[in-house]
Amino acid sequence: MSQNLFGQYFVWHFFDVPKELGKAWKNYLRSYFNFFSTGSLLKTLFNPWHGMVWSYGRGFSFTRYAQTIISNGFSRIVGAMIRIFLIIFGLVAEVFIFFIGAIVFLGWLFLPIILAYGFIIGVKLLF
């Protein structure tokens, strides 16, 4: 308590709260990355959609093998397309959260200037 009130406010506003805002910002980014499972979707990009695979069956039949290969390939292509869409959507959400966090962070840092300017404009409008 050796600091004056202005010094305590300065430390709180410019050191303590920005550190907590940074932690919250990082938590939001990590949360949305996990929410969209971006890492998991990248690892399983070419897996069949919902594990839908067809068996080749017993014996050899060229038409059955060709149908199975085409069906399994189509299932993998559908899975990859849906996963790519989800990855893109997740990355767009991450960019959005990043910019919103930057606006909040910078807004907090410039809040004293904004408040002082608003007070001066308000007083000028009164007179």
Image (spheres, grey):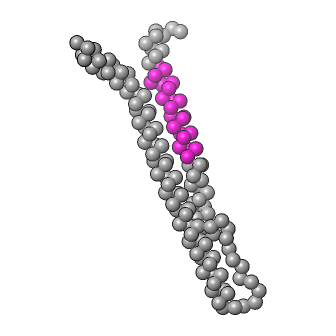
Image quarter hosting the C terminus: top left
Nearest the viewer among 92 and 6 is 92
**Residue 45 x, y percent position in the rendering:** 58, 64
The residue located at (43%, 12%) in the rendering is 6
The residue lying furthest to the right in this view is 58
Q: How many marks?
A: 0
Q: Is residue 11 left or right of residue 40?
A: left
Q: Nearer the viewer, residue 100 or 71?
A: 71
Q: Is residue 70 left or right of residue 125?
A: right
Residue 103: x, y in percent?
41, 36
114 lies above or below 58: above
- Above or below, 106 against 88 in this view is above
Position in image of residue 58 (x %, y %): 77, 86
Q: Residue at x 55, y 63 (%)?
A: 82
Q: Residue at x 65, y 81 (%)?
A: 68
What type of secondary structure mainly makes up the magenta span? helix
| Picture quadrant where residue 60 is located | bottom right
Magenta segment boundaries in residue numbering:
11-32
Residue lying at the far front in this picture: please name it.
126
Q: Is residue 95 above or below residue 125?
A: below
Question: Is residue 118 highlighted in magenta?
Answer: no
Q: Is residue 16 magenta?
A: yes
Quarter of the image for residue 55 reads bottom right
Q: Residue at x 56, y 62 (%)?
A: 83
Q: Is residue 121 above or below residue 76?
A: above
